[in-house]
Amino acid sequence: MLFRLAYLTVTNAFAALRLLPMGDRDKDVEILVLRHQIAVLERQLGADTRVRLAPEDRAFLAALLTLLPREVLRRLRLLVRPDTVLRWHRDLMRRRHARTCRPKRPGRPPTIRSIRALILRLVRENPSWGYRRVHGELATLGIKVAPSTVWEILKQEGVDPAPERASTTWATFLRSQADALLACDFIETVTLSGQRQYILAVIEHATRRVRVLGTTAHPTASWVVQAMKNLVMDLEEAGCRARYLIRDRDAKFPALMDELLTEIGIQTVLTGPGCRA
């Protein structure tokens, strides 16, 4: 179409140069002849037959005739109505504007590099987070990205964005924190004489070593605290770096025991109904 339009423009430019030496009388005669030929053509085609013009013919006529005032355009004898010529010109300008405004890269724009780096940093520092948890953290920071975008970034970097990574299971917590975990509990047993005894034992999750702190028939608060003091001294001598002690809510554990452990940097974690011990 562009080649044909350029051809029409060049040929009609030479035709305009040919009209320069012609006088007004010769031009008027040629215009009358052309108008008569158009009238004969309209008579032969009939009222119900439409003239078919190629796209390049429409573009050329629209560019040439749209410069004329509407009153002059309506007085011309054309094969089409003046409103049709104006519509051709509007369509030509609309297609030109659409080409200039068309984006160079189709589709959704790429994610900003700093946001990609932040997503990967959040996952690297929090291995248990899934893509939805990361999306929630970004929303908290005021960064608007779709969850699917976070998913695609993690997949491209070879990171598993599966939903099961969004929560930490008890087994995963124990494996990742085994070196820092202790657990204690009372073991009830009955001797050959029929007396009930309570054995206080502590297990180190990393080594599976069980420390028996003592046994008594009456586990008083002072007895439990003294047993814990002995445990603290043993841990310091062994170089154990425990940070958490898991125990149940048994009333035989006094509050002073938790305070003693807190002073040396061991936090007590209580289990309850529904928790796995």
Image: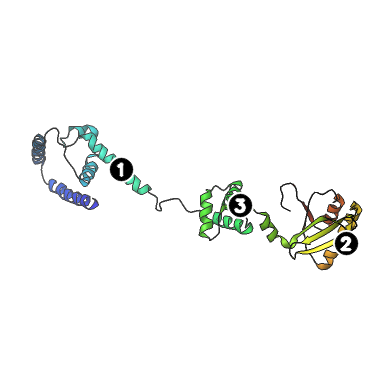
Observer-nearest of 258 and 172: 172
Tell me the amino acid under the disc marked 2.
Answer: Asn
Q: Is residue 191 above or below residue 142?
A: below
Observer-nearest of 203 and 14: 203
The residue shown at (59%, 53%) is 164
Label 1 SS: helix
Could you tell me how far apart the alpha carbons at marks 1 and 2 are, in whole angstroms? 91 Å
**Quarter of the image holding residue 186?**
bottom right
Q: Residues within 10 Å of mark 2 (few under 14, many from 20)?
A: few
Q: Residues within 10 Å of mark 1 (few under 14, many from 20)?
A: few
Label 3 SS: helix
- For disc 1, the marked residue is 93
Locate residue 229 relative to residue 159 in the image: left or right.
Answer: right
Q: Is residue 120 above or below residue 35?
A: below
**Quarter of the image holding residue 174?**
bottom right
- For disc 3, the marked residue is 166
Tell me the amino acid under the disc marked 3.
Answer: Ala
> Which label lies toward us, 1 or 2?
2
Could you tell me how far apart the alpha carbons at marks 2 and 3 are, in whole angstroms? 40 Å
